[in-house]
Amino acid sequence: ESAESAEAESTESAAEDGSDVENTESVEDNDNADNADDAESQSADASEYTLKQDEMPELTALVQSYCQAKTDCDPEALQQLFGVTDLSEDQIAAEREKMELVKASIKAYKNISCYYIEGAEADSYVIFPYFEIQYRKASNLMPTLTWGYVKKQEDGQYRMVSELSDTEKEYVKTIGERADVKELQNQVKEAAA
């Protein structure tokens, strides 16, 4: 099971029971004290970039594909979004079973959007997928904001990254501390309350 898959299920479960709708793994939780050298060699300056929404169709399509794979309970499609193609039949069956449990309470993902900021290196992005979850037993949609890291692969396609390098973790932490990102998180929290 990928870290992103576990995170998303945890976020969806938290949103269903009314608890915090943000990613349960806070961008501030990364322990990088021993990685100062990596952070210093970082080429990107987060302050140079602007938080954007849906200006890169390929990033929005990636988030839409993620939500569709979750809705369809398709672990192979979900893992392909992370560049994983070598799952065993047992892994596929176990992941599908977990996805079916989530689907039992979630009917659909609506109003899908992708906020993003350029990443720590070329052709990478810190993404903030936004969607509204339609639960089967609730009439109101639940606004949800998560985060992820995306890189362009050799085949030219963007893929989500489940394991970040120390430099990427530090960069994501810096992005998470930006005023515009905190404002977006607060807006989603208020809409979900």
Image (cartoon, rainbow, N blue to C red):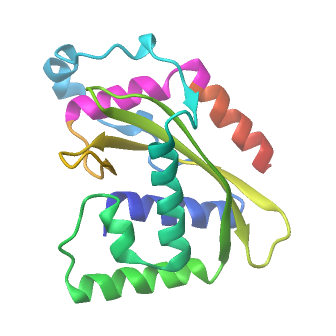
**Residue 151 % position (x, y):** 29, 41
Quarter of the image with the N terminus in it: bottom left
What x and y, as percent, mark residue 167? Answer: 23, 29
Left or right of residue 49: residue 41? left
Numbered disc total = 0
Q: Which residue is depicted at the point 20% across and 38% down?
A: 165
**53, above or below 131, in the image:** above
Rendered view: 48 above or below 129: above
- The answer to whether residue 17 is visible is no
In the picture shown, does residue 62 fall above or below 26? below
Which residue is at 41% across, 83% downward? 96
Location of residue 4 in the rendering, given as x and y in whole percent from the top left corner: 39, 57
Vertical side of 19 occupied by 88: above or below: below
Is residue 148 rendered to the left or right of residue 151? right
Foreground of the two, 19 or 119: 119
Identified at 14% across, 18% down, the residue is 37
Q: Quadrant of residue 48?
A: top left
Q: In the image, 112: left or right of 35?
A: right
Q: Can you tell which quarter of the image residue 184 is in?
A: top right
In this view, the residue in front, 38 or 47, is 47
Q: Where does the magenta region start and end?
A: 166-180
Does the image show residue 59? yes
- Taking the magenta stretch, the answer to whether it contains residue 143 is no
- Secondary structure mostly taken by the magenta-highlighted segment of the chain: helix
What is the quadrant of residue 169 in the picture? Answer: top left
| 193 relative to 161 in the view: left or right | right
